[in-house]
Amino acid sequence: MARAIVTVTQTAKRGDVIEIRTLIGHPMETGFRVTGEGARIPRDLIRKLTCRYNGDIVFGAEFFPAIAANPFVAFHTIATESGTLSLTWEGDNGFAQTETVAIRVT
Amino acid sequence: MSRIARRIAAIALAVAGVAHAQGDARRSGFDFMSPATQAMQRDDTSNPAMLWVGDGEVLWRAAAGRAGKSCADCHGDAKTGMRGVAARYPSYDLTAARPLTLAQRVDACRVRHQQAPTLAPESRERLALESYVALQSRGMPIAPPDDARLAPYRERGEKLWRARVGQLDLACAQCHDAHAGERLGGSVVPQAHPTGYPIYRLEWQSLGSLERRLRGCLFGVRAQVPPAGAIELVELEVWLAARAAGMAVDAPGVRP
């Protein structure tokens, strides 16, 4: 499993705009590169990042070959209620990883 | 004096004032980076090297080898036990009878105390442990040991630093001493102080050690590149540590 770092403000007031910062370890191999011997390096990309806030999708992103390795994505959402943010990365070769963080809204 | 000449003189004075105020013309590679890359390093939530640091923390506590011991079993909490350690490397090792870099010392510890195999150079595990230990020295001054046994290695390292090598016939010093701050193609030539290693280099898209950087530079001047772990590279590291003595460690750094 890849290592992911998700940073969210742990507590927020209702209606606040909160920032979610995500970083995940992944080679993001484009499929266009070749080794020194000329063999093609197979494509291995994260294709999708989805953020669910208590089950509702609040953010989604599609990834393509031009995204760097170990992609960093930061985005905002509005704090509505206490609960969990769940982030799912999906990609080639059955790559799937989910991280959840709790958030307390006052 | 024309207005332009006066302005240049004023700027020169201001620059000299800054250098004088700090009493040190040495600059970390960090200072030569773009503000965006600096911001990336400054914030641990965006510094990709922290992915390796996280792995290193897990490895630190994981039992390894036939001895079944973890790093933490002997050294305790790295936050206290490893504070300032990375700032002292390369250090002379009695058993090996030569200086070892931090990563080589980790390997030596694995073989001697954990009875585990060494880790491959530039492997994820080795960089993870190295970066986790290096992080504990963040902000501390680079403090090469005052050890007479290091002196011959340091001298050979300095000789290598000043020796023209490769088809391009360039010495390290010609770029990094004489032309630091100027540009090589689109990139700024830094002063080559090893403050941030292991670094997450954007060009590599990965974490890498000082050894990798040195080998890359030697390849760049089309010199014969010493193999990983070669004593010449350690000698260069000993010299670079002496040259950067007193500068603050900013590991794990991000570099362009």
Image: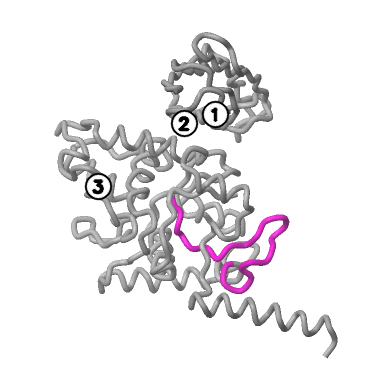
Q: Residue at x 22, y 49 (%)?
A: B81
Q: Quadrant of residue B141?
A: bottom left
Residue B125 pos. (x, y %) = 36, 36
Left or right relative to A56: residue B89:
left
At label 2, which amino acid type do we have?
Thr
Q: Which secondary structure, mark 1?
A: strand
Q: Quadrant of residue B111?
A: top left
Letter of the chain that mark 2 sits on in the rendering: A
Letter of the chain that mark 1 sits on in the rendering: A
Q: Are marks 2 and 1 in contact (CB under 8 Å)?
A: yes
Q: Are marks 3 and 2 on the same chain?
A: no
Q: Earlier in the sequence, mark 2 or mark 1?
A: 2
Letter of the chain that mark 3 sits on in the rendering: B
Q: Which secondary structure, mark 2?
A: loop
Q: Which secondary structure, mark 3?
A: helix
Which numbered dot is residue A18? 1
Left or right relative to B162: residue A1:
left
At label 1, which amino acid type do we have?
Ile
Mark 3 highlights which residue? B108
**Label 3 packing within 10 angstroms: few (<14), some (14-19), many (20+):** many
Mark 2 highlights which residue? A9
Q: Are marks 2 and 1 on the same chain?
A: yes
At label 3, which amino acid type do we have?
Ala
Marks 1 and 3 sit apart, C-alpha to C-alpha, by 46 Å
What span is in magenta? B176-197
Q: Residue at x 66, y 19 (%)?
A: A62
Q: Is residue B182 in the magenta section?
A: yes
